[in-house]
Amino acid sequence: MNRNLKNHRRDFLRMGVTLVSGTAIPLGFTACSKEDEAKNVNPLQTFVQPMMLEAKNGVLDVTLTASYWDGKLSRVDSGQQYPVSLRAYGYDGHGSSYSGPTLVVRGGEQLRIKLVNNLPVNPPFVAFRDPTNYIKPNTTNLHTHGLHVFPGIYPDKKDTEYGDYVVDPNDGGVIPRGDTRQYVYNLPKNHPAGPFYYHPQYHGSSAMQVASLMQGVIMVRGPVDDLPEMEQAKELIFLFQAPYFSKDSIEKNYGVGEGSLERFAQIANDPTGHGLHRPGYINTQPVLINGVRQPTIVMESGEVQRWRFINTQVFNYLNLNLDEHILYQYTTDGWGSSLYQEFPDSRQKDGRGVVLAAGNRSSVIVKAGKPGTYLLRSLPVKISQSNNPIVLPGDVLAKVIVMEAKRAIAPVAEKNSASAMPSVPLPVSDYLKPISDEEFASAGGKKRSIIFNMVGNQIEQKTDSNFVAWNKALNSLAEMGSDTLESIKKNTAKAKQEVAKITGRPIEGSVYIAPNPVPKYDYELQASNTMIQNVILGDVEEWTIYNCNNLSHVFHIHVNPMLITKINGVPIKPYWCDTVALPAGGTTSDPKSITFRMRFDDFTGPYLMHCQMLIHSDLGMIQRVTVVPQ
């Protein structure tokens, strides 16, 4: 394999840490008293990171295997472990674990991932008569979230190779029991540097798979990482996960064995989760960091570290805050800024930290303050506007222990030490230059409007933590019967037609013959392959995404980043991202909105835009984009 291995667990093993089932357990832990901990006597860092695989000679080649992982994970209580059996990734002959490896590449390099699906065969297809079991939970594929790479199938290859291709028809995808797919991602030389991640995007099953443990980090390096101060700063990667699984104390297990996630309704009926509860708030899933609940980070006073935040949750937001410290953000998602955006401790102020919706990422610089113990928290965050708003409760995510510096650092030497903040302006890729009015007009000036509207609207929260709209929608599936099946057949035939056009290969079943006229329903599932938006390569367009629901949906578009220019029609200071929270509180008569501009550069082919609350995406809040040559 052409790569270097960087195992950040090695340092912890030298410190006497045993890694068991994705959890760091200090040897002789019971010998450490609470009094010693309070005095910061030899604190032990229990923050661990996934294996890091780095490109060598311009290529990183890895085999990623999907299978079940049988291990133990914490829920709310970090000291209490629960046995689980969840879908997860392994790599290069290593068994599956709490996450996939971290893949490190630079602009101009090639990332090759061979995906092997060793999950068991899918259960019988009874989705539309049994709403607790949806589509094909063990068929999969791979999406590199945020990467600016080719989204199609490479032509004229002896052995088929795929870019970031996830518009699989219902009979496509990487099927269970050993099927494989070779993905190849050629990053442009000027690809922006920052944190990205990979996860499944097979329509109908993405939420169940990501809500297990199927995710991993992609780090794209660039000039900002080559700054001496950045190289000196220790890098910590925070893969925020919230796996859903049944437990004996949960009433609605839908007949699923303890520690498993096998029914779509386990997350669809309780999308925020059922693990944390605070008076006045709803339940949410407890968050793990790299498979560990509430790990400890040890720093020296004055030390500078760079932290990479990746929110892989399928529904919930994070609102990150570090007690008595400032988080200096320099990337939003994977897209850099030349200046820092400062997020001081906001517990006693506006309560707004680094807010990450599902799929959002962030890079921050942290400089440790005076010795003491501090908490990395997710502060409460409201994600809907209604008479009964959805408010996610605060949570403690990690503990940071700051020790006295071992030696004082002279001011002259500080510039080249681990206590120096990287100075601004930071280098930023020329790909991220602003889109001016002149560029927009000269490239066509086309505008589009996209509507996000979940059937049922007015998302309300019951006292038993079930969404009214979800229950109505899921219950209606059982009543649709053969008419809905005919609708699915029709959409599938259309999808096959479009795939056949792209690949140039005929596909069986691409012609639909209706037995009788099919009546219309108010609620229908939308196939991910529906042709909605066609764009010409090289164009620059302005899109407005309207939210007609109380809930703050999360908009994500593949391949090309967005330059956000307006919120609810009001101009803001533009910024780049690939995943954005839509303003809450919209209705069909008065929707809320965000507006962005986008360059459709470099790549033709089909890809997706959808709600990154993956339950919504699987239910149909998803559309297809196809970029065609000029």
Image (cartoon, helix red, strand yellow):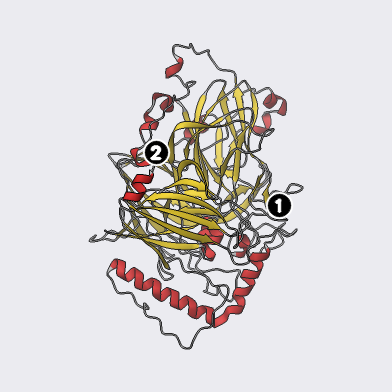
Q: Is residue 629 above or below residue 144?
A: below
Which amino acid, by three-letter code, is at mark 2? Answer: Ala
Drawn side of residue 603 relative to residue 344, left or right:
left
Residue position for label 2: 193
Q: Secondary structure at mark 2?
A: loop
Q: Is residue 98 visible?
A: no
Say above or below: 592 vs 305: below
Q: What is the x, y in percent for residue 277?
A: 72, 49
- Judged from this view, the residue extending furthest toward the bottom is 516
Cα–Cα gap, marks 2 and 1: 37 Å
Kindly identify the amino acid type of the residue bearing the numbered disc 1: Ile
Q: Secondary structure at mark 1?
A: loop
**Camera sees residue 503:** yes
> Could you say which disc has been placed on residue 426 in the image?
none
Q: Quadrant of the N terminus?
A: top left
User: In the rendered image of this protein, does residue 406 appear above or below residue 595?
Assistant: above
Q: Quadrant of residue 464?
A: bottom right
Q: Where residue 296 appears, x then y in whole percent?
A: 60, 33
Image position of 324 (left or right of 116): right
Looking at the rendered structure, the number of numbered marks drawn on it comes to 2
Question: What residue sits 62% from the left and 20% below the top?
Answer: 370
Residue 183 rendering spot, x and y as whole percentages = 34, 55
Label 2 with label 1: CB-CB less than 8 Å = no
Q: Which mark is residue 282?
A: 1
Direction right: furthest residue: 279
Looking at the picture, tell me which residue is in the foreground, 61 or 458.
Answer: 458
Q: Earlier in the sequence, mark 2 or mark 1?
A: 2
Q: Which one is in front, 432 or 494? A: 432
- Indicate left or right for 157 with 194 as reference: left
Q: Residues within 10 Å of mark 1 (few under 14, many from 20)?
A: many
